[in-house]
Image (spheres, rainbow, N blue to C red):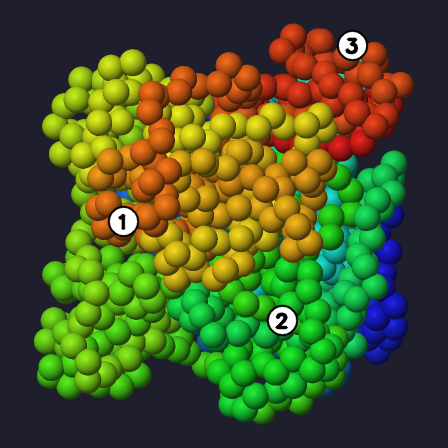
Amino acid sequence: MRRKTPYVAALGAAALVAAGLTLTPTASAQSAAADCASDPGAHIASVPSPQQFFGFPLGTGQTRILTTQELIDYTHAVGAASDRVRLGVMTNSVLGTEMPYAIVSNAANVTDARLKKIADDIVSLRDPRTLTDAKAAKIAQDAPAIVYVAGNVHGGEKSGADASLQTLYELASGLSCDVKTRNDNLITIIVPTQNPDGRDASRRQNEFGFDLNRDWFARTQKETDAKLELLRKYPPQVFIDAHEMGGRQYFFPPNADPIHHEIADQPVDWINRIGEANKAGFGFNGACGGSVTVECYFNYATYDMFYMGYGDTVPATGFGAAGMTFEKGSSSAVPDRVQQQFNTQWATTGWAAANKHEILGSYWDIWKTALAEGQQGVLEPNEVVQPTNTVRFPVPDVKIRSYFLLPDRQIGDVRKLVERLRQMDVEVYRLTKPLTVPNAKIFGGRSESDKVIPEGSYYIPMAQPQKHWIQATLGEDPYVPFPYFYDVSSWSNPLLAGVDTVYSGDVVSPQAQLVRKMEGGVAQGASKKGSFSYPLDSAAASELTFKLLGQGVALRRDLTTGVVSFSPGEIGRAELDELATSLGVTVAGGGDAPSGTLLTIPDVGLYNGTGVSTTSGSYGEARFVLGAKWGLTLKPVTTADINNNTAAFTERGVLLMPDGSNATGGLTAQGQANLKAWVSNGGTYIGLRNQGTRVARAAGLTSTTEKAKPTGYQVIGSHFRVDTATSDPVALGRPAEDFQFNNGDPILNPSTTGTNVLTYPADGTWWVNGTTNGADALKGSAALTNEPTGAGHAVLFAYNPLFRAYNENGIHLVANALLMPKGAAAPAAQKRALARTAAPAASAEETPLIGGEWRPFQIQVADADLARTQAVVAKYTDTATVASAAGSSYLTIPNPEGLDIHEHPFLRDLVNELNVAGIPLRSVVG
């Protein structure tokens, strides 16, 4: 069970007693105030009710789900009619739909001056260096706590948004003492929909196909970015993220394991206690169990708090809030779905109001504890919350007091990471003099004594309030306590970017300056006959390159150094400085004329044919990165276009084949011949992951073959060290050793006719983080190949380099592939390519694509439990296959559509039934 750290025990009790927070209930809790009604149905008549506005109530009696425009219109109507409400707009969605929010409290709390005071006070509680204990206690006594009710982050999951409007109506117009207690003690911020475009399309993802509930730390999407800025302005103590799932049940915490070790004890305690309040207020059929299987609630299953991209983990880790996922079964009738969502929202706000003093006092303690731990270099221990679980993998005994991001390369991506940290209120410093670190740990599992950290490096001390967030996003390994996954097991931001990073437990006193704004821009001017230049060595520099090309700037690139140069007359210095600074890229001026190969805007075809989902995954990621960020015009290419050799295909210079579920992409033999001929004539084929590599193989564009994965093989979104063939144009600007993200990707035997651009080491430099089993099978295999055919190339990524648009080192490699001149390849690779003759058919030994763009589902049990497990699984599917190794049996369930566990029609229920049956699950990968 979760337990307090020594720091919490020492600080928490003393601070609470000193502040009197455990002794003094709120005035509204002591007695009903005279200015409130005992009738819970009493409301202000001038505020329109849902019945008046829509013609039906919300919840019980509701006849249909609301439209997005109705959500917006009703929010505005209530805001205009109630002096308890202040309205704002977070942003507009990708398609331009307004995303409103409503701040609700008593009328005195929502004046401009009072709201600013409350926000400033809560922000100050997050920094113990700026307040005394007495001042913090006074804030806890006087200020309301901040609670968010956010709906519809997944567009098709609509009931939480509808329920949030009922919550808005009750708080904005209710005259009962129950309402008054909430409004006197809380600022409730209601965000009806976090994903209006997805809601309009009844689709989980946003317009670019991104799952916004995986985007929180990276904040690549404008909807996420704006939401986080709202949370920074009004930091939450409680955050409800209202979802839907399959079936007719309801989930609210306590959560399933694993819970990330850097989530503080206080929010976990609040979450579990809110769960008790939700049990009491749920109604309907109460707890699931026995004969009660519908319109009931369950806890401790399915929904963990591990990955730092969720709407519960980020509020909890980054803001110290009780971040909670609420999930209602979408098969229930509309009135039941909305009413149950409202019941839990109402119970949660009631608990928060009743415990406001304790919450704010403990909120102060969260940041005091973080500061103390950071000063000592202490990481939080791994713990579990499910009563039947124990910690399988403890956090190692390691001290971390500092992180350093080195500036020797990829400075644009380094600075973008610095900004990502600063946007979560992390203090980052730039060294003004070199610093010697006695005991340095270098990302990738290496150590160095007396390492010199150069001037210009970025220094992130752990001795600051955001210590938990720093470790949770920068840490070399997340240290999972229990092997249950429905997402990835690594998201280390330095590894995603592939930037040189050092950490240490040493006490250091560097000479450094606080970073206060984005750095970069034009470092110095260029003479009229000289040039501006920058290294194209990062995702940030890639974006700068495509934006300059889009403005008509004539760019040249040295194909040995990777440096891009251009005449100063091509663009005004001020405009260039603004653009480069926004991307963190330093542009240098000099006296030498531009030199190198002329770069051109690639004419890119984006395949949307057989096997490819156009509403999610790498297709949407390509639209976002290449289209929205880089400004490239992506032209659709269909299966029929390639099979019939139409101009929509043949006139393209590049074909990007996203990942998907079809090994041939639906291409006929003639289509495969057409594809190979197009490449031979100078086209560049870029294939991603499963479908991208297999289509190339079927068309005879590669000599790679797929290696079978061993029994029990698990690579659950982990990072690996890879060796880079730096002489290849696709690798231009990358280091000799890099890092690559692998999410159960195909294992490619190396090419014999092209360049193996990235390979997994087979020697002592092998390194992996996260959670894996049997990953040694990757040793010596290829992660990226560049195979010349005639005047063209097939560039094959075994992984998805565009994954969630936060895999910066992979994004840079895609840019290199797009910008590669015709015929550019190492001479040895050209010679080997001549040896490849007839197009080899897809190997008969290749396994079916059973995971789509995600992964198949895998359940690991002891061999002795196999028969019982198979009996349960057989109730749900006859597609499961079984393999055994080392005393474990692995049941693999195909997932050809690449569904998340929440989208899958039965997996969640299957896992729950296995738990109810008492079958010990050694691991679950969803």
Residue 676 visible in the current orientation: yes
CA gap between label 3 and label 1 equals 57 Å
| Spot occupied by residue 652 in the image (x, y as percentages of width and height) | 18, 36
| Residue shown at the point (45%, 53%) measured from the top left | 725
Q: Which sits in the foreground, 695 or 292?
A: 695
The residue wearing badge 3 is 871
| Spot occupied by residue 342 in the image (x, y as percentages of width and height) | 58, 37
- Residue 203 lies left or right of residue 707; in this view the side is left
Give the position of the C terminus as an image quadrant.
top right
Which amino acid is tagged 2?
A: Val
Q: What numbered label is drawn on residue 502?
A: 2
Q: Does residue 81 lie above or below 425 as drawn?
A: above
Label pair 1/2, CB-CB below 8 angstroms: no
| Spot occupied by residue 785 in the image (x, y as percentages of width and height) | 42, 41
Secondary element at tag 2: strand
| Residue shown at the point (70%, 69%) measured from the top left | 447
Secondary element at tag 1: loop
Which of the 4 image quarters holds residue 874? top right
The answer to which of marks 1 and 2 sits earlier in the sequence is 2
Secondary element at tag 3: helix
